[in-house]
Image (cartoon, rainbow, N blue to C red):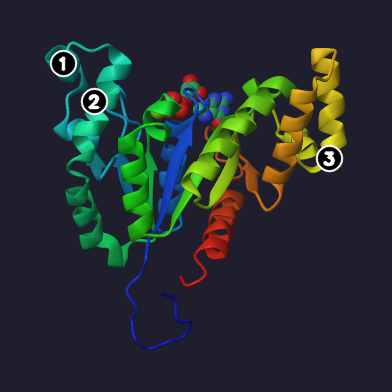
Amino acid sequence: AATAGGTTKDAKVPTVILTIGMAGSGKTTFLQRLNSHLRTQKHVPYVLNLDPAVNKLPFGANIDIRDTIDYKQVMKDYTLGPNGAILTSLNLFTTKFDQVLEFVDKRAAELDYVIVDTPGQIEIFTWSASGAIITDSLAATYPTVLAYIIDTPRTAGPATFMSNMLYACSILYKTKLPFILVFNKTDVTPHDFAVEWMSDFEAFQRALMQDTSYMSSLMNSMSLVLDEFYENLNYCGLSAVTGAGFDDFMAQVAKARDEYYAEY
Ligand code: GDP
Ligand code: MG
């Protein structure tokens, strides 16, 4: 709702940045850095923590699943293991998600961003009904961008790279939301290899062949699928620890959002 130079004060529409990624990829650290990055730019975000099992949150959350749901108690009450308890906690929280949206809505006019952290294990959010309900209800209310966080050092081998990309690809097709591949931990391993593999199909196939000593037709076909996935895909490299690359990330967010939500 941006009317440049208009005298009427249009209500702002915040952009939701939903963080997903494998356990240990750096989602929580990324959200901490993003929170402080936005604050220094006077874009105070609204912060949602959806991870019931995080011990210590390194940022202040406006809404924290742990405030209403005690995941250790859920383990006892439902005799569940840790993963089952995290999923059940998310389910319980999702039944009240309309209230969460009301809280956000009250503040929406003064917000530029709503940033969301999700449970450590990716599938608890991406392959659960609750995760889908939360994602869909956010995306139905505000322009929503997925930030898929990648542990760059652990994805530097061609086979792991391919499986991580296929996972990202499956989420993109499942959610159909604007999507950014975020190569994190570039302070440890720069993401140049990823840029090369995404832009030069043959370079990736050569690396894959060296890695596995053969190139099965399945791998060949999968890398062809990925080549299609990379087209029009937004990506960036950053370090959640040093803060390098966050300006580029925010540019990617604006680009992904504007391409997708042309009306905003
Ligand atoms: P999550 O499970 O995805 O929420 O991951 P965390 O944010 O808890 O991070 C997992 C580990 O990766 C922690 O030890 C972090 O300190 C580390 N980490 C996260 N981001 C970075 C980064 O940009 N660089 C480095 N070197 N380590 C990072
Ligand atoms: Mg986390």
Q: Quadrant of the N terminus?
A: bottom left
The amino acid type, in three-letter code, at marker 1 is Tyr
Disc marking residue 78: 1
Residue 239 visible (yes or no): no
Task: Give the residue pinned by disc 2.
Answer: 88
Q: Quadrant location of ligand 2?
A: top left
Q: Which is nearer the eye, 1 or 185?
A: 1
The amino acid beneath tag 2 is Thr
Q: Secondary structure at mark 2?
A: helix
Q: Earlier in the sequence, mark 2 or mark 3?
A: 2
- What is the quadrant of residue 140 in the picture? bottom left
**Three-letter amino acid code at disc 3?**
Asp
Mark 2 or 3, closer to the camera = 2
**Residue at 74% across, 41% down:** 227
- Measuring 83% from the left and 24% from the top, which residue is drawn there? 207
In the rendering, which numbered label is found on residue 200? Answer: 3
Rendered residue at 33%/59% (across/down): 141
Q: At which x and y percent is residue 134?
A: 32, 44
